[in-house]
Amino acid sequence: MKMLRKTSFNKNDSFADLKKAYELAASKKGIPIEKLSERDREQIKTRIVELQRAERAKFIRITVFFMLILIGLVALGVYALEEYVLNPKPETQLVHETVKAEYAEKIYFYRRDAMKWQAEHHWNNAIFQYKKVLEAVPNDNEAIHGIIQVCQLRSDTTYNEFDVAVQDMEELLLTYHYRPDVVNGYSKLIGKRTSSDE
């Protein structure tokens, strides 16, 4: 059985405290810790407590420093998100406006082309172009009225064209059944059929 060496510190002192106390005592006059006076021991204990407080204060300062850096980075991220994503600068807006302008050009082309085909009585091409407009802008009034008008004009030509016009109107009605103009256009078209049958 190994005997433990007796020290002058009580049981509540930790190993780290004991080691620091020994180092302090050894550095001070080179006297072993057992031979120190009570006053010297109290000074060593006070010095140990001061060193521990200084270490805790240093740890707290470092923690606060890194927390401030983290808060700064989060604030910078929020600022960048708001500045560049939510409220883009004029250069970014210019890019978006250019894309919108190109998109508007396409829609204008589809509408113009549909009207040209309608004037030349090419009903399938006209409806195809109006549908292209509706793909781009789903609730476009001009395209919907254009399809209704094409179907009305087409139904006046031949009986076969009348059936195709009814099919086109039914297809439009399936998508836009909530619009009164589409429902009225379909009713007028069906009304032509019943009047022609009589």
Image (cartoon, rainbow, N blue to C red):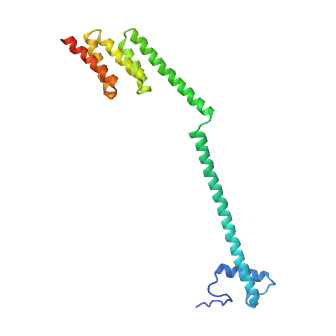
Image quadrant in which you'd find residue 156: top left
Q: Residue furthest left?
A: 198
Q: Residue furthest right?
A: 29
The structure residue drawn at horizontal position 40% and vertical position 27%, both measured from the top left corner, is: 139
Q: Residue 30: x, y in percent?
A: 80, 84
Instruction: In this rendered view, identify the residue nearer to me: 181 or 68.
Output: 181
Quadrant the C terminus occupies: top left
Quadrant the N terminus occupies: bottom right
Horizontal relation, residue 196 to residue 92: left or right: left
Horizontal relation, residue 78 to residue 106: left or right: right
Image quadrant in which you'd find residue 87: top right
Horizontal relation, residue 7 to residue 127: left or right: right
Horizontal relation, residue 188 to residue 110: left or right: left
The structure residue drawn at horizontal position 60% and vertical position 29%, both measured from the top left corner, is: 94
Q: Residue 185: x, y in percent?
A: 31, 19
Q: Is residue 160 above or below residue 70?
A: above
Q: Residue 137: x, y in percent?
A: 44, 26
Q: Residue 45: x, y in percent?
A: 71, 82
The structure residue drawn at horizontal position 56% and vertical position 40%, both measured from the top left corner, is: 86
Instruction: In this rendered view, identify the residue nearer to me: 11 or 116.
Output: 116
Count of numbered circles on the image: 0
